[in-house]
Image (cartoon, coloured by chain):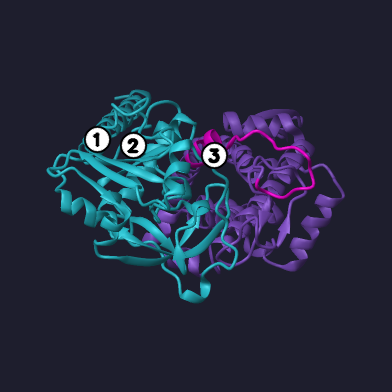
Chain colours: A purple, B cyan
Amino acid sequence: MAGPASLRILELPRHSALVRVTHWITAISFFALLISGIEILISHPRFYWGETGNALTPPLFQIPIPASRSTVPTSYGYVLPDQNGWSRYLHFEAAWAAVLTGLVYGISGLWTGHFRNNLSPSSSDRSWRAFRGAISKHLSLAPPDDAEAFSYNVVQRVAYLMVIFVLFPLVIWTGLALSPAFNSAVPAAVNVLGGRQSARTIHFFVSVFLFLFLIVHVAMVTFAGFRTRMRAMITGHAPSVRIGEERT
Amino acid sequence: MSKISRRKLATTGIAAAGVSGVAAATGLAKRYGLVPPDSGGIFGAGETLTYAAQRLMTPHSLAREFPRSMISKAPFGNEVASPNDEFKRLQAGEFQDWRLSLDGMVTRPATLSLSDLKGFPVSRQITEVVCEEGWSYIAEWIGTPLVEVLKASGPLPKARYLVYFSIDRDWWESIDMADALHPQTLLTWAMNDGDLPVSFGGPLRMRVPRQLGYKSVKYITHLTATDSLKGFGKGLGSAAPEAGYAWYAGI
């Protein structure tokens, strides 16, 4: 005999402990890298292409902000305080934290099938149609359905894979290419990018893309339900409203 | 054995292995000179990782050298504090009386004039000056490899660092022996087609091309070989950490 249908709220597993821990270490590291990176940028907000560039050579472009060095020509009549000391210490310490965490995440993600199962788009989703559908659903700001609390749609999957396998490796590579000692050991790391100043300019743009991802990511979490999504990434569980199963 | 206690056991085991692993790594790093003098404080872990990793990666690697065609048409000397009276006096005498003294853990301390220095084998390199702010330029640097001067004065085997001072005694740096004995570390007295201009560190500048520009101190007058940096300044290795900047500037 079928019993009456009832609403039941279940706590279902969402994110593994490893995903949650590495997510938050990466989040803290990225915040530190962003703040310290901006501080370092302020000491010379001019960008060049090729191997060399300095205050006496024409820039590719200049960010219209005041600088923390009097030697940089800006349109401002004042110089900001120098914050590069702690910013550089913090930038590299946070980079170590992010890289080591990324290694743990990457290796375990391959090992446990996290990338294959949770991030690789399913075969039915590997089409422009599916991608466009997910995009237009995002743009309409329609509330996500219940299943999306437990699985990423194709746009999310592609975005996360881009961040994990393109933007993060690229920002690490271009960052390392700014180290004169690293370049002495691996000159190709900077040479194939077209030179030191090109590496710095690419490092800046990749950082901008990562920052844009962060903005969209936080905005989407907010739209989808800030409390449930945060709970899922902190406790590992997400609440699910289910129509009760038939009981006998 | 229940599942919970097994998990606890595993967690405790991993934590214990982690702690003893870090302790063992720290011990090894100290033994092999992979801990920088500014390794204390909240940034010490990152700084030690950077220094240790780069030291292991770059014992003998050479800074990139460039073709003559890439020498910068507009090199940038950066600003320096206005020269002190001693510098002005020596400058008035066209640096004839400029002296570089070398002491500390060497068997034959020495005091060298610029012409004494030029009597050593001369080395030329077209390398890039890389400022921590982000800008850079390429020049040809001509001078005496530091290793030649050190070899002549016989550094003691226990010497681990070379400390170098500008004529402005508040401006001093130090490098480990891997950099001090490196063939590209140059006591530079000429640049491109002429003498080293004062704005670029003339008459004598230390060039350490595998590190950022602030290790390439201008107006060098004094070198000291030592086994410990504790007795210099605040014991952090150089003036840079005292101003909040990292001692090791390979990055």
Residues B245 and B195: in front is: B195
Instruction: Give how far across and how far down residue B217 sits, in percent.
Output: 42, 46
Residue drawn at point x = 51 percent, y = 76 percent: B69
Element at label 3: loop
Report whether B95 appears left or right of A154: left
Measured as percent of width and height from the top left, residue B143 is found at: 34, 61
State how far apart marks 3 and 1 are (Cα). Answer: 36 Å
In what quadrant of the picture does the C terminus of chain A appear? top right
- Judging depth in this view, the residue of A75 and B221 nearest the camera is B221
Q: Earlier in the sequence, mark 2 or mark 1?
A: 1
Asked whether residue A90 is drawn in magenta, I would say yes
What's drawn in magenta, residue-wise? A71-92
Single out the residue that lies furthest toward the front: B93
How would you rate the neighbour count of disc 1 (Cα within 10 Å): few for under 14, some for 14-19, many for 20 or more?
few
According to the image, label 2 marks what residue?
A: B36
- Confirm or deny contact between disc 3 and disc 1 (CB under 8 A): no
Query: Residue at label 3?
Result: B81
Q: Quadrant of the N terminus of chain A?
A: top right
Which amino acid type is marked by label 2? Pro
| Identity of the residue furthest to the right in this view | A140
User: In front: A113, or B225?
Assistant: B225
Badge 2: chain ID:
B
The amino acid type of the residue labelled 1 equals Lys
